[in-house]
Amino acid sequence: MLGLKLPTDPRWANIAEMNLEEILTDHAFCEQKAASTAISLIVSFPEYTELVQEMTALVEEEMSHFKMVHDLILSYGFNLGRDRKDKYVHQLLKFFPKGGSRTTQLVHRLLYAALIEARSCERFRLLSEHLKDKKLAKFYKKLMISEAHHYTMFLKFARQYGNRKEVDQKWNALLDFEAKLMRNLGTSETIHG
């Protein structure tokens, strides 16, 4: 369904469970960054009314997810740790060349966002299926559904605003690149790493 070319080894969920405070902190900041991405799209492309409306709703949703994760952190007796660089996103953002038309820039940003949401969805599915903590597993199942919606929304907008054939070619190339990137990730207590 997600089109990912290299699935995460299910043992990653064990790493996450053994480092719950770290994974929850990383997750909280992922939600904050997702909200920031939506705000950035609004600021950069205000002329796309439908996109602005959807991104406005997404900001609210992502910040509500941030609050839910932060509340979970506190319920486990943890504190929100410091944000750290997301190696996955940092490497992913190197794929498309800088520059190009505004439409090209928009499509690239939407494809990046779609892929990040797809990988998050896949990771949340693993957590929902493998965590021993049933409350936390149920929480991740609910968020998995939300992430799947975000993934399809971003991909739909990329196809809507760009040339469908070119967008699909770029999407497949990005999926191939991401699969190579994932070969070196999946061993740390981060949502994407």
Image (cartoon, rainbow, N blue to C red):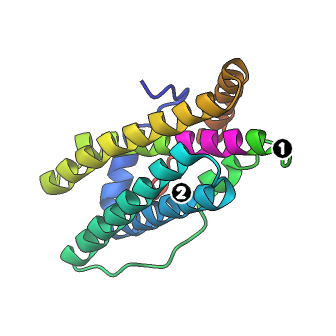
Rendered location of residue 19, percent (x, y): 36, 64
Q: Amino acid at mark 1?
A: Pro
The residue that disc 2 covers is 38
Category of crowding for the residue at label 2, using alpha-carbon neighbours closer than 10 angstroms: few (below 14), some (14–19), many (at least 20): many
Residue at the farthest left position: 134
Structural distance between the alpha carbons of marks 1 and 2: 21 Å
Q: Disc 1, disc 2: CB below 8 Å?
A: no
Category of crowding for the residue at label 1, using alpha-carbon neighbours closer than 10 angstroms: few (below 14), some (14–19), many (at least 20): few
Q: Is residue 166 above or below residue 143?
A: above
Where residue 183 sits, quadrant-wise, is top right
Residue 184 visible in this rendered orientation of the protein: no
Magenta residues span: 106-116
Rendered location of residue 123, percent (x, y): 40, 44
Residue situated in front as seen by the camera: 41 or 149: 41
Camera-side mark, 1 or 2: 2
* Quadrant position of the N terminus in the picture: top left
Rendered location of residue 71, percent (x, y): 24, 73
Residue 165 visible in this rendered orientation of the protein: yes
Rendered location of residue 33, percent (x, y): 52, 63
Magenta highlight: main SS = helix
Residue plotted at (43% across, 37% down): 9
SS at badge 1:
loop
Residue plotted at (44% across, 46% down): 120
Q: Is residue 113 magenta?
A: yes
The residue that disc 1 covers is 97
Side of 13 relative to 130 (left or right)? right
Q: Amino acid at mark 2?
A: Ala
Side of 190 relative to 15 (left or right)? right
Residue plotted at (32% across, 64% down): 64
